[in-house]
Amino acid sequence: MSKPAFSAVTHLTIVWAVTLAVITIIEWRNLELDPLNREILSPFIQREITVLNTQPEPYDTATKPLAERVAGDSLRYEVEFHFNGPLFLLCFFGPVLVFLGIGRLWNMRKDNRS
């Protein structure tokens, strides 16, 4: 019987790499559609939200009640996303190296038994 082209470790590595890449792309796409309300699950995507008042205050805001200040303001939200590339590479290649190490240990153990 011929030896398979890919070992189980190689299959796990490919599945891990493709899964991580697809999940990251899907999450990034969902964040682009609704940047304020979506929860970020990936540790390597970071969101920064800045709230700006686009309407200048014509008088002192200290004398104005809080409810009027909030209701009358025109707010603009600026959302920035940052992608942490080194952390992504660590999450991408870290498990791959673990899989390969476990595979080598398994093969060494099998060879020692023979």
Image: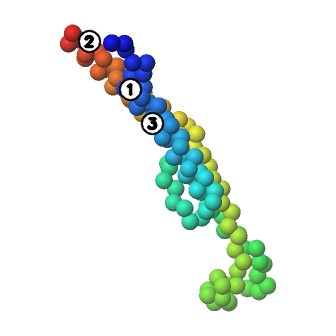
- Residue 41 visible in image: yes
Q: Is residue 28 above or below residue 49?
A: above
Q: Which residue is more in the foreground, 88 or 3?
A: 3
Residue at position x 59%, y 51% from top?
A: 28
Q: Position of residue 102 (x, y in %)?
A: 33, 25
Amino acid type of the residue tagged 2 in the rendering: Asp
- The C terminus sits in image quarter: top left
Q: Which residue is more in the foreground, 74 or 92?
A: 92
Q: Which residue is mark 2?
A: 111
- Residue 54 picture quarter: bottom right
Which badge, 1 or 2, is on the more N-terminal residue? Answer: 1
Pointer 3: residues within 10 angstroms few (<14), some, or many (20+)?
some
77 lies left or right of 18? right
Amino acid type of the residue tagged 1 in the rendering: Val
Q: Position of residue 67 (x, y in %)?
A: 61, 87
Q: Which residue is mark 1?
A: 9
- The N terminus sits in image quarter: top left
Residue at position x 53%, y 35% from top?
A: 89
Amino acid type of the residue tagged 3 in the rendering: Trp
54 lies left or right of 71? right
Q: Is residue 91 above or below residue 73?
A: above
Which badge, 2 or 3, is on the more N-terminal residue? Answer: 3
Q: Which residue is mark 3?
A: 16
Q: Position of residue 113 (x, y in %)?
A: 20, 12
Residue at position x 54%, y 62% from top?
A: 38
Q: Disc 2 to disc 3, how far (Cα)?
A: 27 Å
Q: Is residue 72 above or below residue 93?
A: below
